[in-house]
Structure formats: structure tokens, C-alpha cells
Image (cartoon, rainbow, N blue to C red):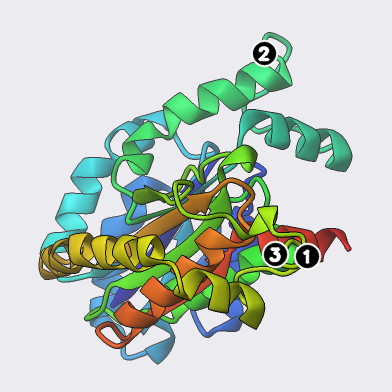
């Protein structure tokens, strides 16, 4: 049985993720009580219904608090049933969650006469901590559109088999903030910056003029080799210990030139070694979204 558990704070995109998995053939259950995880596994083992071979459930703050607190116990018991489990934890910064609730005018599941919306959002983070600590993949949806979140779930979750580790190489700009869901962060701001050449400023790291400029720099080659040589043995070690997901972020000042170029180069190297490798350019995607 393949079981995907979707969790995270309210407003982070759990319903969207569950709908994507449902469209991909998963049998989906919204807000399954934690205590029923074992019974779900047992029923799947007994059933001849192929629909129960791939199941996705959401577990969130609507669950009983005692169930969430005991989640690690139930998780360990499920592993003993030989259930292949992926735990995906979605989150966003508190300010973004506030805006989402105000725009939809929905009631937060924890808010009441004694708790404001802001307080409910902060308490929810502590309540879900036992699940967040067990997560195989954490996705920060603060800057993701609905369509980008759908694509990430399709590529990273549904596109991964139990035998392979899914790798995401992501470029970003430090002036926009370090991605919160990154496992490794590399700073390449010390490299020559094409931005200061007026003839190159309007291009990005995917364009040939910038590629030609950066590939001609000895510093760029040394940085590329250093990142690859550092990651290669450690990614193998993580894969050997059944790590399911890894996000490697490469950042420059604006996320347009140096980080994009190196993200492409390093990602291409590891695409020859791993089956599931994706490359994403955070600031380039943001620019396209705002046009």
C-alpha cells in the first residue's frame, strides 16, 4: 500500500494537494482521524480493491488533539505494517495565511470567541509539530500560485517511486529571502555578476549571452565543481538511508543570472545520476507570474 499523508496549517493548500492526488488515481480521505491510520492499513491489506493500493489522507488541526500528539506512535506502527508512507507538510508564513483567510472569509478551525485569527494560526503551528517533525517533504506555499502548487505535487509526490529520491534544484535571490523549505543552501554572490554589464542586464541565466559570460569565468567553474563535489557523496548517503525528498537552493543577489546558470548546470549533472530531478527558478517564475 502506498500512503501519502498531507498535513499543514489551514490555508496552506492541503485541499488543493489532495485534489491533485485524487485526479492522479489516489483514493483520498479528508481529515482522517489519526487513530484510524492502522485500520486503514489493515483494510487495504485485506481488500482486493485496487483503489486502496494508493491512498492519500489529510490530517490537520480539525483532528483530535490527542491523536495528533500520538501521531509518531501510529506512524511507527504503520511502518511495521509495511506501508510505504510519504508525509507532505504544507505551510506558509503567518502573514500570508492571514491574508488568505481574510480574502476567503472562511473561519479558522481553531478560532472561537476567545481566540483571534492570528492567535489561532500561531497555535496551530505548535499543535501540528508532531506531524511536521516526521515530514518527508515540506513545501512553503507562501509565494506559490494554485497552479504552481499543483505542479509541485504532481512532479515531486506523484512522480516519485518508492525506490528513488526526488531532488529539486532551485535558484533564488537573497534579496527576496532564502526558501524556507531548502535542505541545502549555496551562496554564489561572490561570482562575477552579469547584472553590471548593461548588455547582459536584461537577460537571465537561461539566455546564451549570460551562459557564455559565466562559463568563461574560472570562478564559476570552481564554484560549480565545489557544489557538485560536496553534494555527490552526501546525496548518495541520504538516498541510501531512504530519504524521499531533497531540496537544494542556489542563491545570488536577485535570482536572475548566476544562481539560474549554476542551478541548471548542477541540476543537469545530477539528472544523469538520479531518476527524479527537477529544476525550478523561483524568481524567474515570479517574474512570469507578475507579467
Q: Residue 173's x, y, as percent?
A: 59, 48
Which of the two residues, 260 or 217, is positioned nearer the viewer here? 217
Mark 2–mark 3 CB contact (< 8 Å): no
At a point 48% along the width and 39% down the height, the residue shown is 63
Q: Is residue 73 left or right of residue 212?
A: left
Which of the two residues, 121 or 180, is positioned nearer the viewer here? 180
In the rendered image, the residue lying farthest to the top is 114
- Vertical order, 210 against 87 (above or below): below
Mark 2 vs 1, N-terminal side = 2
At a point 51% along the width and 42% down the height, the residue shown is 178
Mark 2 vs 3, N-terminal side = 2
Mark 2–mark 1 CB contact (< 8 Å): no
Mark 1 vs 3, N-terminal side = 1
Name the mark nearer the viewer: 2 or 1. Answer: 1
| Residue under pointer 2 | 115
Mark 1–mark 3 CB contact (< 8 Å): no
Q: Is residue 233 left or right of residue 205?
A: left
Rendered image quadrant of residue 106: top right
- Vertical order, 20 against 146 (above or below): below
Give the label on residue 285, or none: 3
Give the label on residue 175, or none: none
Element at label 2: loop
Crowding near pointer 1: few (<14 within 10 Å), some, many (20+)? Answer: few
Measure how far apart labels 1 and 3 are at the Cα level. 16 Å
| Residue under pointer 1 | 202
Q: Residue 251's x, y, as percent?
A: 49, 51
Name the mark nearer the viewer: 2 or 3. Answer: 3
Measure how far apart labels 2 and 3 are at the Cα level. 37 Å
Quadrant holding the C terminus = bottom right
Amino acid at each position: 500500500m502506498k500512503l501519502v499523508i498531507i498535513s499543514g496549517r489551514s490555508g496552506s493548500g492541503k485541499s488543493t494537494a489532495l485534489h491533485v492526488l485524487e485526479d492522479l488515481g489516489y483514493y483520498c480521505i479528508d481529515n482522517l482521524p489519526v487513530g484510524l491510520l492502522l485500520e486503514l492499513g489493515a483494510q487495504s491489506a485485506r481488500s482486493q480493491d485496487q483503489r486502496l493500493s494508493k491512498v492519500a489522507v489529510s490530517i490537520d488541526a480539525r483532528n483530535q488533539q490527542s491523536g495528533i500528539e500520538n501521531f509518531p506512535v501510529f506512524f511507527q506502527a504503520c511502518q511495521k505494517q509495511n506501508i510505504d508512507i510519504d508525509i507532505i507538510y504544507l505551510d506558509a508564513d503567518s502573514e500570508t495565511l492571514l491574508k488568505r483567510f481574510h480574502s476567503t472569509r472562511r473561519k479558522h478551525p481553531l478560532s472561537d470567541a476567545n481566540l483571534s485569527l492570528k492567535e489561532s494560526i500561531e497555535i496551530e503551528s505548535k499543535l501540528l509539530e508532531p506531524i511536521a517533525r516526521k515530514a518527508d517533504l515540506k513545501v512553503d506555499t507562501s509565494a506559490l500560485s494554485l497552479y504552481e502548487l499543483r505542479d509541485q505535487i504532481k512532479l515531486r509526490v506523484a512522480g516519485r517511486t518508492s525506490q528513488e529520491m526526488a531532488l529539486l534544484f532551485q535558484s533564488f535571490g537573497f534579496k527576496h529571502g532564502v526558501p524556507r523549505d531548502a535542505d541545502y543552501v549555496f551562496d554564489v554572490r561572490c561570482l562575477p555578476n552579469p547584472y553590471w554589464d548593461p548588455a547582459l542586464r536584461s537577460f537571465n541565466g537561461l539566455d546564451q549571452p549570460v551562459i557564455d559570460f559565466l562559463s568563461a569565468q574560472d570562478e564559476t567553474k570552481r564554484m560549480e565543481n565545489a557544489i557538485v563535489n560536496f553534494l555527490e557523496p552526501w546525496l548518495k548517503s541520504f538516498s541510501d538511508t531512504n530519504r524521499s525528498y531533497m531540496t537544494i537552493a542556489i542563491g545570488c543577489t536577485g535570482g536572475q543570472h548566476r544562481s539560474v546558470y549554476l542551478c541548471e548546470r548542477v541540476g543537469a549533472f545530477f539528472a544523469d545520476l538520479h531518476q527524479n530531478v527537477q529544476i525550478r527558478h523561483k524568481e524567474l517564475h515570479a517574474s512570469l507570474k507578475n507579467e
